[in-house]
Image (spheres, rainbow, N blue to C red):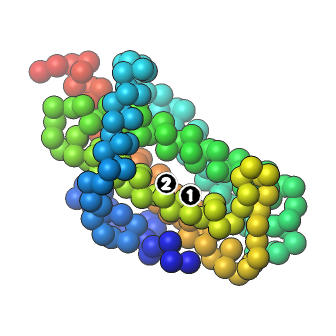
Amino acid sequence: MEWLYPFRVGAAWSSQDASLGPAGTRNRDSAANRRVRAEVHTAQCLTGDRMIDFDELHAQNHKITELSNVFLYLIPERAMCDTECARTLFFDYVAKVREHMELVDAQLCGCLIKSQNRTMANTADRFLSGSVEIKRIFAAYLKDWCNERKRELSIADHTAFVKDTNQMFGLVLDRIQRETEHLYPLVRKLDEQARCPA
């Protein structure tokens, strides 16, 4: 599918790389990016300075990984794709991914982007730009392979579905890995600085 870009699962990732989209192309400051940043600032105003719950984030990561692994294990068998179990797993996964990305964008990136530390703010900005691209790809994937209103999978080409699903789920897990390695430590550092000002 043309909407899926090559990406690097488990590859080394530097703070400079965070500005790159799944294809390794630098994201431009589009209207969509600016809108996401505005939404983040609004969300921060609404949530205030509520402490970020890393246990909740780790629980989300674990659940997304678990749903991903089970669904990917089932779908190579065509008949399994038509079961209620597979549909439930799929749409649970979709809901969890959306919930997680909104939480990360609003709280982690929202916290960092307001920082006076330019490295932290720039890293958050790059992750927000990447989030716009991932959401676009995810929306295209869902449009191709399911009917969300009816909560049904629409699989005309099983081989293509399996390939696209492996790529899409891999992209999400790659994003979560980068969050864990690059966003979480920065937020913890920012919290420590706030608690123990120099």
Left or right of 89 in this view: 141: left
Residue sitting at x 41%, y 53%? 132
Identify which residue, 19 or 197, lies in the foreground. 19
Quarter of image, res 80: bottom right
Q: Residues within 10 Å of mark 2 (few under 14, many from 20)?
A: some
Question: Pointers 2 and 1 in contact (CB under 8 A)?
Answer: yes
Locate the C terminus and report the quarter of the image it occupies: top left
Q: Position of residue 121 (x, y in %)?
A: 22, 40
Residue sitting at x 79%, y 52%? 150
Please name the amino acid that badge 1 sits on.
Answer: Ala
Residue sitting at x 41%, y 40%? 105
Residue matched to label 2: 135
- Above or below, 147 against 106 in this view is below
Q: Position of residue 152 (x, y in %)?
A: 79, 57
Marker disc for residue 6: none
Q: Determine the residue located farthest toward the front in the rendered image.
A: 31
Please name the amino acid that badge 2 sits on.
Answer: Lys
Q: Residues within 10 Å of mark 1 (few under 14, many from 20)?
A: few
Identify which residue, 51 or 151, lies in the foreground. 151
- Above or below, 113 against 167 in this view is above
- Above or below, 189 against 179 in this view is above
Residue sitting at x 41%, y 47%? 180
Q: State how far apart marks 2 and 1 are (Cα).
A: 6 Å
Quarter of image, res 81: bottom right
Residue matched to label 1: 139
Left or right of 109 in this view: 162: right
Is residue 185 something that shows in the picture?
Answer: no
Q: Position of residue 42 (x, y in %)?
A: 37, 28
Q: Determine the residue located farthest toward the left in the rendered image.
A: 198
Looking at the rendered structure, the number of numbered marks drawn on it comes to: 2
Is residue 75 something that shows in the picture?
Answer: yes
